Image (tube, rainbow, N blue to C red):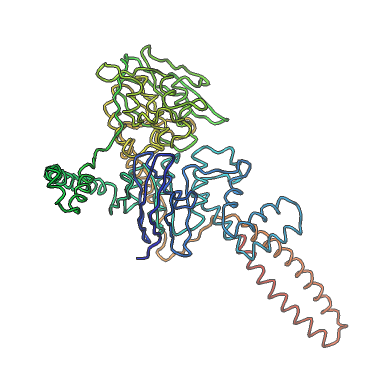
Amino acid sequence: MASFLQVDNISKSYGDRTLFEGISFNINEGDKIALVAPNGTGKSSLLKILAGVEHSDRGGEVKFMKDIRVAFLDQATTFNPDNSIFDEVYARMSDLSPAIVEYEHAITSGDERRLERAIAAMDASDGWSMEQNIRQVLSSLKIENPNQPMRELSGGEAKRVALACMMLQNAEFLIMDEPTNHLDIDIIEFLEGYLQRSRCTLLMVTHDRYFLDRVCNTIMEIDRGSIFTYRGNYTQYLEKREERYTNMQAEIDKSRNLLRRELEWIRSTPQARTGKARYRINAFYDLKDRASVSLHTANVDIDVATSRLGRKVIDCYGVNASFDGRCMLDDFSYKFTRGERIGIVGRNGVGKTTFLNILTGNLAPDSGTIEHGETLRIGYYSQRGMSFKAGQTVLECVQEIAELVKTSDGSNISATTFLNRFLFPHESFNKRVDILSGGEQRRLYLLTVLMRNPNMLILDEPTNDLDVMTLNVLEEYLQEFKGCLIVVSHDRYFLDKTTDHLFVFEGNGHIKDFVGQYSEYREYIKEQEEAERMSQRATQPTKPQNSRTHDTSKRKLSYKEQRELEQIEADLGALGEERQTLERELSSGTLPYDQLSAISQRIEAIIAEIDEKEMRWLELNE
């Protein structure tokens, strides 16, 4: 099996903080690897070094196999807001891009000579097939309007454009940083299937454990600045990681027992020490280092009180809402109750975030009534993230909310202690919020929501940018949460663990209330689709066994085919006129024999050419 990537002795630090140092690893052809580690330990930095976006500190080498293509999907891709989707994708293509871009511009220029040159360039570079391929990829990602300006796209739509750019590179090696962020579940499942079928080699960071399990065959972990590789899926990784920790702990305990005996020896009388072997003294210090290793893993500690919640939470009566001329809520009525655990799902743009903003009072409905209970205290974790003042530090951000935080046992702890429990050490308190990693900002945002002791939690895409370890802790907290919980998420694993019924946004303001977990809902949908297929087959007439079926659907002609069709029609008209002229000359009776013979041969050639062109005309029109 060929080695696609060899990484030797690379390091990365920011200021006095070392993310990783001197790490080396190898990735073989066909490996599909997920990189896991807590936030702030350098996952994104490592991917950027491999993609050539950043460089290793203090040397090191990143060596890909010669001539393989590498594509990188960053967490956030910067686009030209003035470009259309189509132009943006074209601009990011390889050597074919200039011909296609020039062709698109030549069409709108009105310059016939420029258009002719552009068509010739398209023919020479096979740009027509590339154009069709781009349209197919955009369609598969449910991008219906390629002419839409990039500035108008939502986060999920922009992520789909970035995915299209990556897929169209046809790279042998893919590097992907949080590919499922901001995507709706249908697109996540499409991407899942695409990567499962693809023969590419893959290295990615993802928090989506279902996605990870179904796509990857190897887990690579950054632990204490070193790389550890585990063959198998996420479940097998957890088992093997626990086994590694058990073995390491046994080695540490053994080293500590030896250290006690060596310590007695090293503390013996100075006179005796001078006669002792120097190598044994050096070995003592090596043993001391091994014995001092701690396997303790710091995890977020979520321990906050839930404010008392009365019987009335939020009552909705006949709520209607629209946005940009589209119906988001159509006569919605519902009474939320204490202890409910609702998951909200649906494709991008059907009104999920609008619904949350109406519930929280941030947005007024077009009509209908929203009533909040007197004891209601909402904690709203918004998809857009936390807001903070320019230059604000971590401690200032927290102290602006409260100096003390009430915990589940009724006691109060300081804001600084609460920061420690969310893995913000004392040295990070004066760090500016804007220089934190994406995951650290999300963790700080979660802290600021929970420290207000809410009794209703509304979480809009809480899994984006949070590491798997923090997600596990958050899931455990939410499972024990005594208030009312509403979660909008595209993370199927997270939904299954934290919610027990769903609001399914189906579009046009219609919301389906499904009792059960998300996995159960997907099984229900599959059963419905299968029943519908069976019903359609039962009502279709039986066809003869040997009958040939024809696809009667007409596809839209490409620009090249349309030009060919127009040329054929012009040629048929000219050939018909020439034939009529020659037939009149032939019947005049005044031509010499040699001219009669030449005209007859020409008429035969015209008839054959007309037959050929008419057949092609029929093919294009079918």
Residue located at (23% from left, 40% from top)? 294
Does any portion of residue 177 appear in the rendered image?
yes
Residue 341 at what x, y percent from top left? Answer: 32, 27
Residue 549 at what x, y percent from top left? Answer: 47, 61
Q: Is residue 582 left or right of residue 131?
A: right
Q: Nearer the viewer, residue 405 or 211?
A: 405
Residue 275 at what x, y percent from top left? Answer: 14, 51
Q: Residue furthest bottom?
A: 593
191 in relation to 354, above or below: below
456 in relation to 580, above or below: above
Q: Nearer the viewer, residue 147 or 295?
A: 295
Q: Nearer the viewer, residue 583 or 267?
A: 267
Image quarter in which the N terminus is found? bottom left
Residue 463 at what x, y percent from top left? Answer: 38, 36
Q: Is residue 577 left or right of residue 366?
A: right
Q: Is residue 192 left or right of residue 92?
A: left
Q: Is residue 269 left or right of residue 574?
A: left
